[in-house]
């Protein structure tokens, strides 16, 4: 039997982590809030389908992932216009000094830029495993992909992130492995 009060409590407790995940996908606060709201609306609409033996955050991340994929597909069908010089950049919120007073803002900006430059598939897996502390199996469940694919994306994402933070360009922007000639 589904308990609406218990579901509501679990949902409310998961919102901060859901917003953080949405922020990692979208990279701007407004878009992330829209994505999180879309996911929450879908969750509330389908609350009766939630299996209470399952971790609600994994379920919400799955919904958020699907909403993000839907939005990317919709955007790909539209004719998108690049921002002009007068419009804010997608990372303009980072320039306002939101960092802690003692934090190294340069490193944070480098990390944000490096994460943003990763293919979305690698960034999703890397952030779910590395930041949200999902197990590989939970990540695979949330993204509806095989476990081995999660492990591969996390590994490639970590390697590409290290390269970018070391000032080296990644071996491939697609995340495909570099082939070496063996003689």
Image: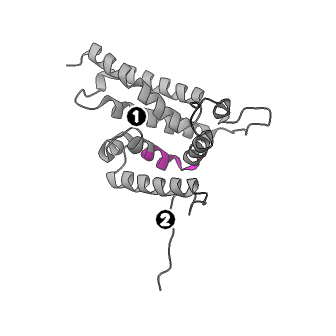
Q: Quadrant of the N terminus?
A: top left
- Mark 1 or mark 2, which is nearer the start of the sequence? 1
Q: Nearer the viewer, residue 30 or 163?
A: 163
Q: Is residue 35 above or below residue 137?
A: above
131 sits to left or right of 163: left
| Pointer 2 residue | 177
Asked which secondary structure carries label 2, the reply is loop
| Pointer 1 residue | 61
Residue 60 image-quadrant placement = top left
**Residue name at image x 52 percent, y 53 percent:** 161
Q: Position of residue 44 (x, y in %)?
A: 38, 20
**Residue name at image x 48 percent, y 27 percent:** 36
Q: Position of residue 19 (x, y in %)?
A: 47, 28
Q: Is residue 70 above or below residue 182?
A: above
Farthest residue to the top: give it: 5
Mark 1: few/some/many CA within 10 Å (<14, 14-19, 20+): many
Q: Position of residue 87 (x, y in %)?
A: 75, 32
Q: Nearer the viewer, residue 56 or 70?
A: 56
**Residue name at image x 26 percent, y 32 percent:** 54
Q: Which residues are magenta?
A: 117-126
Marks 2/1: CA distance? Answer: 27 Å
Residue 72 image-quadrant placement = top right
**Residue name at image x 42 percent, y 46 percent:** 125
Q: Is residue 55 above or below residue 7?
A: below
Determine if the magenta segment contains residue 157. Answer: no
């Amino acid at each position: 039997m589904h308990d609406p009060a218990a579901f509501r409590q679990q949902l409310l407790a998961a919102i901060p982590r859901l917003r953080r995940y949405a922020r990692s996908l979208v990279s701007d606060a407004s878009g992330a809030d829209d994505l999180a709201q879309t996911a929450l609306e879908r969750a509330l609409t389908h609350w009766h389908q939630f299996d209470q033996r399952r971790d609600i955050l994994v379920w919400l991340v799955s919904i958020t992932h699907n909403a993000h994929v839907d939005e990317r597909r919709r955007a790909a069908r539209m004719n998108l216009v690049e921002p002009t010089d007068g419009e804010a950049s997608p990372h303009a919120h980072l320039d306002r000094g939101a960092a802690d007073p003692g934090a190294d803002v340069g490193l944070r900006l480098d990390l944000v830029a490096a994460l943003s430059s990763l293919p979305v598939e690698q960034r999703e897996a890397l952030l779910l495993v590395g930041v949200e502390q999902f197990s590989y199996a939970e990540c695979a469940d949330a993204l509806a992909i095989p476990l081995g694919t999660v492990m591969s994306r996390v590994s490639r994402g970590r390697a590409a992130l290290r390269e970018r933070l070391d000032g080296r360009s990644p071996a491939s922007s697609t995340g495909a492995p570099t082939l070496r000639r063996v003689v």
